[in-house]
Image (cartoon, coloured by chain):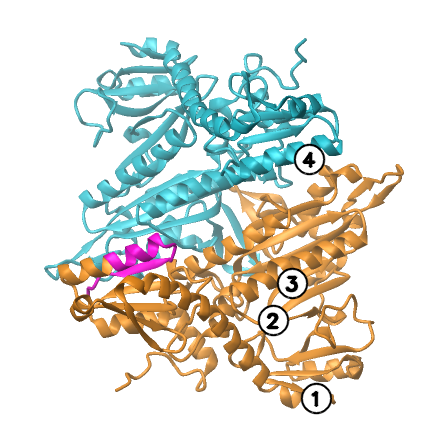
Chain colours: A cyan, B orange
Amino acid sequence: MAQPSVLTPQSDDFPRWYQDVVQKAEMADNGPVRGTMVIRPYGYAIWERIQRELDDRIKAAGAQNAYFPLFIPESYLHREAEHVEGFSPELAVVTHAGGDELAEPIVVRPTSETVIVEFMAKWIQSHRDLPLLLNQWANVVRWELRPRLFLRSSEFLWQEGHTAHASAEDASRYATLIHLEVYNDFLEQVLAVPTIVGIKPKSERFAGAVNTMTCEGMMRDGKALQLATSHELGQNFARAFNIVFQGDDGVSQHCHTTSWGASTRLVGGLIMSHGDDRGLRIPPRLAPWQVVVIAVRDDDEVTHGAREVARELLEAGVRSHLDSGRGSFGRRVTDWEIKGVPLRVEVGPRDLASGHITLVRRDSGEKITVERGEFVGRAREILDEMHDAFYADALAFRESRTTSVTSVDDALVAAQHGFARLDWDLVDEAAEARLKAEAVTVRCLVRRDGTLPQHEEEPNLVAYVAKSY
Amino acid sequence: MAQPSVLTPQSDDFPRWYQDVVQKAEMADNGPVRGTMVIRPYGYAIWERIQRELDDRIKAAGAQNAYFPLFIPESYLHREAEHVEGFSPELAVVTHAGGDELAEPIVVRPTSETVIVEFMAKWIQSHRDLPLLLNQWANVVRWELRPRLFLRSSEFLWQEGHTAHASAEDASRYATLIHLEVYNDFLEQVLAVPTIVGIKPKSERFAGAVNTMTCEGMMRDGKALQLATSHELGQNFARAFNIVFQGDDGVSQHCHTTSWGASTRLVGGLIMSHGDDRGLRIPPRLAPWQVVVIAVRDDDEVTHGAREVARELLEAGVRSHLDSGRGSFGRRVTDWEIKGVPLRVEVGPRDLASGHITLVRRDSGEKITVERGEFVGRAREILDEMHDAFYADALAFRESRTTSVTSVDDALVAAQHGFARLDWDLVDEAAEARLKAEAVTVRCLVRRDGTLPQHEEEPNLVAYVAKSY
């Protein structure tokens, strides 16, 4: 008989299900200061895996990591007018330090744009210093009145890339490279999340950007989540902070800059893209632990047998974890299901005697019994297959919830349970306002063939319209 | 003819030499807010190597990474009286956020002790939850009036470990394990820095600690630098934050906690432990780039040859970097010397024709010519040998600057150029005050056989006395 779920079912109350998963999978807690977040070891292990995968790709794209200060003089934020308008109400301000009131208030970075471009201006002299490709892993603060763990927190962790180029073409080429080869490759190949890769309409762009690319994923409640964004900033920041270089011809000109970021929000996206009523489901390439080996009970023979299994997996490069057998077996199985470990191996006296091992897939629940001598190889094969299954499942779900429509009215109806797809020509300013009044936005614009447009004035663009996080 | 050094010689003005190295090796810059630091890509690559090496050891010691908030309610810091006294004048305080004045001011963490123990109290119920072994990589803020890059900055990066245990013995055992197997092993085996591993006298202990262990290194000016510390906190924090567990016998009792940290200060320690008048010297196990392959000039044949050499090294697991040949050769060699890359390979037309490769050691300046077919293997051997040479060199320097003395007067004299070693029995409260008046402190106490004491009341302890950073 199936045990009653310890989680609120998704169909009953999706936000409550999300909260339950975050808590019961021991992912995160609310911090003592409103809107802040304590990331618990299991949640942080997932973030470390995300960091490693993104960081390897960022370095392969030629960017170098650096670290810029947490504190920014308030005056910096006024130099780029649109930028400060975008952030003012979200800022946390330090007014006292070292026992005294400060002469100039200091802002806790909401992003490092301004301070990084200030230093780019110092470091760049000639075209030989270009492109300058920097990335930073850091915490940033944007005050949140309605915080939600991982999705919207007053402090969050992210990477922010900032680059300077000699031409608009080179800036555009690099931002696109990052968007496709770093973000989208990670999302599809590791997070197993199918994305809509498009550009933001002007109304939804980052303050100061001339073009913003986005990867939009569909969550299990049909809403959109922006998983990563890449901005071409034109010469806006270069003019405000005077980043100039001397070209081949000796003439000084302003650089073209880009910025691009992804955050701990990705952990929220992971939970809502793949989770089910039994908890998290972590795709195998991302999982901190790909296989949990559960000793059915706490006796020497069983624990020893389970330890052997876990060790063999580790030696074959499979991230395995041993649950050595204390406490109720049923409870432990439930807990590992909530934590979403892709494969479970249960080791009991009968398994040890039989010379067989039973693997249980977290995605489908399927049980696969294999010979002891073959199980490590089979476990690796199954993990490989599971990645594709996760992706296919998420894609099928998205397609089942995506409706092609021919009017803004129909888009509003379709957006109640998923994505609406309609001609961008049909969405004028008034239509955007109508959508927004119903908490529906244009998530992004793509070409009819699914490729990334250069700008929103291109003919024949399609808009994806949805509710979102 | 030797070129004039681009750096101030160490013997002329050591602090100025340090500043020159930090700037010319492109390690760091001052941030716009007083005391903050911009860590440039080369400095950050070194920090990433330090992080990776420490993190691997921390995980092997069983601790798990987590993340706690940047912001701490001011009231938390008042719960442990000694603790707040230690930090008050250094705090940065947020009074405004989200456009409003806050009801309770928020402190930017000077350490996460208080918030972590608050959550430990929530997570720990029974003895089965112990030990709880947590670590965090984060930025912290302690306002500095006399900042120095890497050594004392208002914001710095660090890891802070925090653990809770069922008994004082287990807490002590674990703190010692971390101190020896994480910190000291890293310092000796990777940073190639010989250390004095001892305990702090009571007067130099971390606020709230019952025992503090330290690793002290000697810098090239004879001063001491505390490279890492590990604290046994007894039940002080457990009582203030009510961390209790139910023992086997059903009786509730307070946990025993520890904390331990190492920071970006280690980068300063690296510079001052190994640097010489030509710049940084980075020990090979730490170096982000172990070999730089310099194309003598920018033509296709030479660049191609140099690229092949760099590629072969990378394939053999040697971290190599290609300098592809633009700009003055002499200037580039000087720059790589300043950056302290352990081995340099110069590739020119003659090398390519001769079938030989010349390796230049950064530590000794020695040139080693090897056959093309054998050079990768030889490079690896030389890098191995260099680690020992770095360590031996630093140890010989320390020994040449360490004097065994029999009075506080003699200790004061010896501490002008290095470490003084004297019986701890000779240092009473008045003697400590006399030393302090001359900016000399007891760095740590060790047993006569060099091992770590349990507490300062043990008989036959030896005190190391020095000026310090």
Left or right, A358 with respect to A350, comes to: left
**Could you classify mark 3 by the number of other residues whose Cα lies within 10 Å: few (under 14), some (14-19), or many (20 or more)?**
many
Residue A100 in view in this figure? no
> How far across and how far down the image is residue A98, in percent?
59, 62
**Amino acid at circle 4:** His
Chain letter of the residue carrying label 4 = A
- Considering the numbered disc 1 on the image, is that residue within a helix, a strand or a loop? loop
- C-alpha distance separating marks 1 and 3: 26 Å
Left or right, B357 with respect to B230, comes to: left
- C-alpha distance separating marks 2 and 4: 40 Å
**Amino acid at circle 3:** Thr
Which of pointers 1 and 4 indicates the residue nearer the eye?
A: 4
Residue that carries the numbered disc 4 in the rendered image: A304
Task: Mark 2 or mark 3: name the one nearer the start of the chain.
Answer: 2
Does the magenta segment cover residue B315? yes
Task: Mark 1 or mark 3: name the one nearer the start of the chain.
Answer: 3
Residue that carries the numbered disc 1 in the rendered image: B405
> How far across and how far down the image is residue A308, in percent?
62, 36
- Considering the numbered disc 3 on the image, is that residue within a helix, a strand or a loop? strand
Residue B45 in view in this figure? yes
Residue that carries the numbered disc 3 in the rendered image: B229
Quadrant for the N terminus of chain B, please. bottom left
1 and 4 marks in contact (CB < 8 Å): no
In this picture, which residue range is highlighted in magenta? B308-326
1 and 3 marks in contact (CB < 8 Å): no
- C-alpha distance separating marks 1 and 4: 56 Å
3 and 4 marks in contact (CB < 8 Å): no
